[in-house]
Image (tube, grey):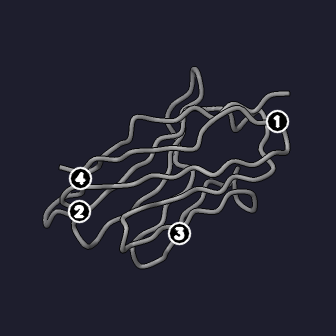
């Protein structure tokens, strides 16, 4: 089992920044991807940004150039630096870890942290 604990959400004004962090613990296989998804009210959960343990990244088009994902493989942590936030970024942000368990991918989720962008 894998446990994920997030921190760093909150209320921020448009144009502001927040840094989200997530720490993973438990049995984590070496080939894995950590990252962030978000879900706004009335919308489906969507990918924000992910980083594999080899350093490869994936970003949603809507956040490219504004958000940066990073991770510390030794500590099993992943962070999301969010800049130039706008109202459309308001959502619950979920940390995700996916690892290859030999024959299938296993996914784990954090409890979510609220990000609200408002003046």
Label 1's element?
Answer: loop
Earlier in the chain: of badge 3 and badge 2, it is: 2
Q: Indicate which disc residue 13 carries.
A: 1
Q: Tell which circle, 3 or 4, labels the residue nearer the N-terminal end.
A: 3
Assign a secondary structure to mark 2. Answer: loop
Q: Is residue 4 left or right of residue 85?
A: left
Residue 78 image label: none
Q: How many marks?
A: 4
**Dot placed on the residue nearer the N-terminal end, 4 or 1:** 1
Question: Picture quarter containing residue 88?
Answer: top right
Residue 72 placement, left or right of 116: left
User: Which residue occupies the extreme left position in the image?
Assistant: 103
Residue in the image at 35% along x and 42% along y: 109
Q: Which residue is mark 4?
A: 106
Residue 70 in which image quadrant:
bottom right
Between 23 and 35, the one nearer to me in the picture: 23
Q: Residues within 10 Å of mark 1 (few under 14, many from 20)?
A: some
Q: Residue 57 got which mark?
A: 3
User: Which label's residue is closer to the chain start, 3 or 1?
Assistant: 1
Q: Give the left or right position of residue 110, taking residue 83 as reference.
A: left
Residue matched to label 2: 28
């Amino acid at each position: 089992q894998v446990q994920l604990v997030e921190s760093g959400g909150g209320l921020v004004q448009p144009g502001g920044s927040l840094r989200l962090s997530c720490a993973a613990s438990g049995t984590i296989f070496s080939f894995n991807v950590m990252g962030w998804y978000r879900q706004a009210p009335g919308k489906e959960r969507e990918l924000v940004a992910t980083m594999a343990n080899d350093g490869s990244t994936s970003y949603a088009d809507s956040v490219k150039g504004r958000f940066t994902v990073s991770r510390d493989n030794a500590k099993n942590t992943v962070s999301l630096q969010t800049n130039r936030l706008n109202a459309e970024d308001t959502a619950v942000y979920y940390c995700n870890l996916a690892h290859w368990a030999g024959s299938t991918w296993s996914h784990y989720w954090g409890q979510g942290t609220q990000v609200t962008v408002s003046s």
